[in-house]
Amino acid sequence: MLRSLFILIFILQNLCLPAQNGLGIFTGIKQESGKIMISTTAGKLVLQGYLNGILQTTFEANEYKGEQVSKAVIQKPNALLKLIKNNDQTLQVILGKTVVTVQKNPVQVYYTNNDRGFAFTNYKVKNEFYTIQFAVDETEQFFGTGSRSIPLNKKGYKVDLNNNPWYGYSSNADNLNYSVPFFQSSNGYALFIDNPSRGYIDFEKAN
């Protein structure tokens, strides 16, 4: 059992037009109403803080038209983020013990807490999906995502995030009844993907 967990909410805003790959190159930063907004050549990263150390990251690609409809997160952002570093190469933001380091060229986002964490490394269009990619440790294990008849550790599996009734199933049924877009890592963090569209999570099956 993990003694501490830092939780992150990820939002990939729905798009209606072809989009460029990658998170782009840093072009500017703005602080407003508790938010930190990082502009890039590919779009905008918005960081917001919640109580209990929960951090939300929203990526809005340049083509985003404002059609996000999710109401899954009820709590309102109410924890202040602090900008502690901003130079030519990187900037750093903290929320409690969580440190967000943004590499500027190209933009990549590193999340750490007590020297553990992961990296948000890429955004791209792949097979009609708008995807976000993360870099993780080789020894990491992943748990959660809802009802499935596969091992508790989801590493090496690809799971759909839409609900799907499946009757008379046996072992290795990877998409049963209720899916939950939330997983917990053995590396001390948890991610909630706040995306109302049909999606999937690939836990190092394809790569």
Image (cartoon, rainbow, N blue to C red):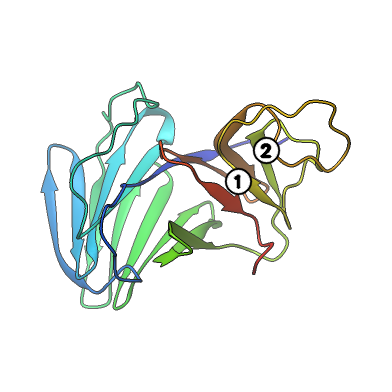
Quarter of the view holding residue 164? top right
Q: Is residue 137 above or below residue 94?
A: below
Residue 179, position as x, y percentages in the image: 60, 32
Residue at the disc numbered 1: 188
- Distance of label 1 from label 2 (alpha carbons): 7 Å
Q: Residue at x 72, y 53 (%)?
A: 157
Q: Is residue 64 above or below residue 103?
A: above
Residue 81, position as x, y percentages in the image: 26, 43
Q: Secondary structure at mark 1?
A: loop
Q: Secondary structure at mark 2?
A: loop
The answer to the question of whether label 1 and label 2 lie on touching residues, with beta carbons closer than 8 A, is yes
Residue 43, position as x, y percentages in the image: 22, 61
Residue 201, position as x, y percentages in the image: 58, 50
Residue at the disc numbered 2: 2
* Residue 28 makes an appearance in the image: yes
Q: Is residue 130 left or right of residue 13?
A: right
- Who comes first in sequence, dot 1 or dot 2? 2
Q: Residue at x 88, y 39 (%)?
A: 171
Q: Which mark is residue 104?
A: none
Q: Circle 2: is it few (<14), some (14-19), or many (20+) Cα within 10 Å? A: few
Quarter of the image where the N terminus is located: top right
Q: Residue at x 27, y 30 (%)?
A: 77
Q: Amino acid at mark 2?
A: Leu
